[in-house]
Image (cartoon, rainbow, N blue to C red):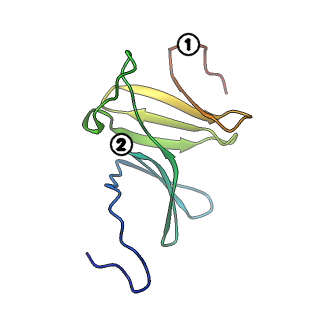
Amino acid sequence: MEAAPGSELVDQDLSVSGVTALPDDSLLLVGCGGLYRLEGNELAQLLAFAPQDRNGQPVSRANWTPNNVVLLDDGSYVISTGSWRSIYRLHQNDNGQWTCLRAGAGEPVIW
């Protein structure tokens, strides 16, 4: 693939496994490497994923396959995965840090 004149081509190993259309005609994309927003021809990475197993060890991207993503009214995201058959809620705290909570683990998620 050739880069457009005046731009740089960067291979970020982008893999998309789930897509959701948003009301503003942009797309919300999710894959093993992160969460992205596509507006027109501009792609912005919102979050990078570094999944870990129950022991805190890094998980191979091949074993982490998010397949659905939904943006909630409060700005948080719900992501489901076929690989681990789980549902996760991602939300940003007041201090700007993101938290991921698996449904059924830890504190109950209510919205």
Judge from the rendering whether residue 106 lies leftward or rightward of residue 53; answer left or right.
right
Given the current orientation, which residue lies at the most extreme bottom position? 5
Residue 82 image-quadrant placement: top left
For badge 1, the amino acid type reads Gly
Indicate the secondary structure of the residue bearing disc 1: loop
Alpha carbon separation for disc pair 1 and 2: 23 Å
Indicate the position of residue 8 as horizontal and vertical percent values.
Answer: 40, 74
Q: Residue at x 57, y 56 (%)?
A: 22
* Foreground pick, 15 / 6: 6
Q: Are there few (<14), some (14-19), or many (20+) residues within 10 Å of tag 2?
A: many
- Residue at image mark 1: 106
Indicate the position of residue 64 as horizontal and vertical percent values.
Answer: 32, 34
Indicate whether 109 appears above or below 79. above
Judge from the rendering whether residue 38 lies leftward or rightward of residue 71; answer left or right.
left
Please tell me the numbered disc located at residue 93: none
Indicate the position of residue 70 as horizontal and vertical percent values.
Answer: 53, 42
Indicate the position of residue 27 as horizontal and vertical percent values.
Answer: 50, 58
Quarter holding the C terminus? top right
Quarter holding the N terminus? bottom left
- Residue at image mark 2: 32
Q: Are there few (<14), some (14-19), or many (20+) residues within 10 Å of tag 1?
A: few
* Foreground pick, 86 / 4: 4
Q: Residue at x 55, y 62 (%)?
A: 26
Indicate whether 5 appears above or below 18. below
For badge 2, the amino acid type reads Cys
